[in-house]
Image: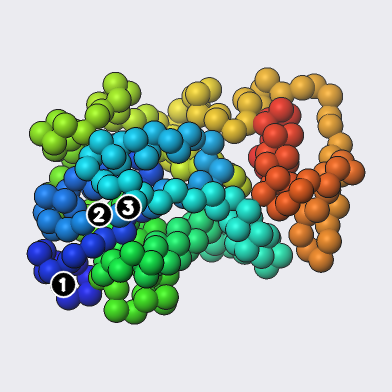
Amino acid sequence: MALGGKKKGDVKKVVLAYSGGLDTSIILKWLQTTYGCEVVTFTADLGQGEELGPARDKAILLGIKPENIFIEDLREEFVRDYVFPMFRANTVYEGQYLLGTSIARPLIGKKQIEIAEKVGADAVCHGATGKGNDQVRFELTYYALKPDVTVIAPWREWDLTSRTRLIEFAEQHQIPIAKDKRGEAPFSVDANLLHASSEGKVLEDPSQEVPDYVYSRTGDPEAAPDKAQVITVEFTRGDATAIDGKKPTNSASCTASAGSISSRIAMSA
């Protein structure tokens, strides 16, 4: 049963946080087959560096009406209203963990609720697992903005509890599967304009060195230039407004510029 008291069959329309990847495509089809409801997809451009056109194409392939597909560029709102205020507050989780992935979740949830109000949806759905904090970030946002909304969390409901089961479901429902998605990924990656985090699998063994291919936003520090580069960042009322004397057009551009520099000199932005 979904959170909110509704049973399968009672939900009429759901807004799904949709990346276009294998997992959320499986969730999309699972919603259609299990709840029998109309599905609306929402894909956020947070500067993750992926083309979003394929997400639209896959949603259409899986039976979503074009008018039920929402793709929004949230890069400026993300940096201006979430990242920069976070920096000003020196927000660090448990005193040591920088908020990269988590700070984007409330914005995604907010947009889902806005779309739900717009299209008359009575439910929202996310792809967070049932064991991490992301489910809390999404759902607190949903309930804060729309207390009567029904929340569907597939990972807490379905029996697709292994990669093999997920692949089998995808094959049964003719969901395209990239070759590199058939096996277990060496680690998981979550990225946005602020950061890219890699975790799990091969990265969890402290006796093993980090493989070179883990670096997606920066270079291997061992391959960094031998000469130091001095970078000057100007701030206005606590927000970065210029880098090396150049003032980008907006907050998102400023963050992207910093990331571009850091990738060349193998440091973290």
- In-image side of 111 versus 264 (left or right): left
Quadrant, the C terminus: top right
- For mark 1, does the 10 Å Cα neighbourhood hold few (<14), some (14 to 19), or many (20 or more) residues? some
Contact? badges 2 and 3 (CB < 8 Å): yes
Picture disc at residue 6: 1
Residue 81: quadrant of the picture: bottom right
Residue 80: quadrant of the picture: bottom right
- Does residue 242 lie above or below 225 as drawn? below
Upstream in the sequence, badge 2 or badge 3? 2
- Does residue 73 lie above or below 199 as drawn? below
- For mark 3, does the 10 Å Cα neighbourhood hold few (<14), some (14 to 19), or many (20 or more) residues? some
Q: Position of residue 152 (x, y in %)?
A: 24, 62
Q: Which residue is mark 2?
A: 39
Tell me how far mark 2 sits from mark 3, CA to CA: 7 Å
Q: Residue furthest right?
A: 245
Give me the residue at 70% from left, 34% from top: 260
- For mark 2, does the 10 Å Cα neighbourhood hold few (<14), some (14 to 19), or many (20 or more) residues? many
Observer-nearest of 165 and 171: 171
Tell me how far mark 1 sits from mark 3, CA to CA: 22 Å
Observer-side mark, 1 or 2, equals 2
Q: Which residue is mark 3?
A: 68
Identified by mark 1, the residue type is: Lys
Tell me how far mark 1 sits from mark 2, CA to CA: 16 Å
Observer-side mark, 2 or 3, equals 3
Element assignment for label 2: strand
Identified by mark 2, the residue type is: Val
